[in-house]
Amino acid sequence: MKLRSKFDSVFWWKTAFAVAALAGPTLALAADAAGTPAIPKMSDLSDLRVAADTVWVLVAAMLVFWMNAGFALVESGLCQSKNCTNILAKNFIVFAASTISYWVVGWGLMFGDGTPWVGTSGLWFVGGADNSPAVGAAYAAMNPFSTEKYAGVYGAINWTAVPLWAKFFFQLVFAGTAATIVSGAVAERIKFGAFLIFSFLLVAFVYPVSGHWIWGGGFLSAGNFRDFAGSTVVHSVGGWAALAGVIVLGPRLGKYRDGKVHPIPGHNMTSAALGVLILWLGWFGFNPGSTMSAGNGKAIAHILVATNMAAATGSLSALVTAWLLLKKPDFSMILNGCLAGLVAVTAPCAFVTVGSSAIIGLIAGVLVVLAVVFFDKVKLDDPVGALSVHLVNGVFGTLALGLFYNYDIASTIAALPPVGADGQVIPAEKWGVLAQTLVQLKGIAVVGVFVFIVSLVLWFLLKATMGIRVSAEEEREGLDIGEHGNEAYPDFSPAHK
């Protein structure tokens, strides 16, 4: 998640000077009485940098926020029409719940200074000293090429100079995405209230604790575990939480009968296709935006192309795999193949070559089809393929970062070379694919065990107290009427004919 390099600093130093020279009255080169231009103040140049970085981060965050629309369309389209309103309501309200829970406590647990296990400073509500805006003034007294970390309540994310609220919003949309993943896997039989409470708890406690280990300066990050934009932090976490929910809930009525799988097709593939296209677009904010700086154009371009490449190859390999395995080019598999490629490349996009990202997407597209078939065989009912996309390929993508690791790209594009216990950079000859892969495996296991067990406990507690599954009658009639009292398609309901 952190990207800061000397290239970035040099770029901004030169660019800011050039813009200042041409920008007119605000940042123009002042002339003295003799007409000699004056050198612009360092504070003006650093403020320009902060402004540009802030715009980039917020635009990227808004693209990620727009992914909520994509998830809503994908999940509702791949589910039955009688549950469409319920799916849309869950995808809508989950971001509202995530906003409050992340603001109240999640952010502090994730990015607050504290222990290698959890943040303890600035814990309740986002607050404390905001050192980010001070960068503009402080930069004047510093070497323009400095990579010094700015101290503060949330020191783990003070490597980026954007204001605190820009950091918060960017991280918030990622937290909301993790909760949204759960929605599709437990669709068509879960109580709306139970889902809402679980989402709140997930974003308040489960997501930020594991996130602290990786992005908040925790022990996994210190051990060189890498996850640039969230194959594990976001997607695997959402996937493990969803798996626990699927196990506790059980399958939909009629899905597995007489030892056979009885498909329950979605009602609107147009909606699903549009949703995936929105998600594909949103990922161009998700991954490149994780640089949290507009200054390094080389990194942004590399990450964006790597992201797109994996989406393309994932779509094609899923198409071929489905055609061979299922004897038809199943469109839902093609859509999930695209998403699988995007999920898989999210962690390694700043650590691998573009060619490697194409291979990662290719493998992800095959994996997602095989995973859908596997989960049906073991009778884990996932209406939209969320486990296959986010869990399986979140794990694979995190592992792929090690398998396809490129030391030079990790040091330049991601600006995250491996560091030893003494704080010194480990040279390339002492750190390769095997070393990084072993570290990635450790992180996958630790996060997986933690999130799955805690989520399982939460689901069982909700089941024992308020119940998590609707009645069989309500499930047959549809959750739109039973849970919300209205329908997405009332003109087509038998009750209105």
Image (spheres, rainbow, N blue to C red):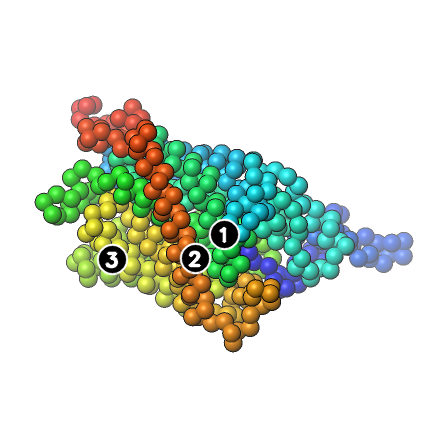
**Mark 1 residue element:** helix
Residue 488 visible to the viewer: no
Question: Dot 2: few (<14), some (14–19), or many (≥20) neighbours within 10 Å?
Answer: many
Question: Dot 1: few (<14), some (14–19), or many (≥20) neighbours within 10 Å?
Answer: many
**Residue bearing the label numbered 3:** 370
The numbered dot on residue 443 is: 2
Identity, as a three-letter code, of the amino acid under mark 3: Leu
Q: Are marks 1 and 2 in contact (CB under 8 Å)?
A: yes
Give the foreground label among 3 and 2. 2
User: Residue at 35% of width from left, 30% of height from top?
Assistant: 193
User: Residue at 38% of width from left, 36% of height from top?
Assistant: 198
For marks 3 and 2 on the same chain, the one whose residue lies earlier in the sequence:
3
Identity, as a three-letter code, of the amino acid under mark 2: Gly
**Mark 3 residue element:** helix
Residue 186 visible to the viewer: yes
Identity, as a three-letter code, of the amino acid under mark 1: Trp
Q: Establish if 54 lies above or below 485.
A: below
* Position of residue 28 in the picture relative to residue 113 (left or right): right
> Splitting the image into 4 quarters, where does residue 191 fall?
top left
User: Residue at 48% of width from left, 45% of height from top?
Assistant: 208
Could you tell me how many numbered marks the image carries?
Answer: 3
Residue 408 on image: x %, y %: 52, 70
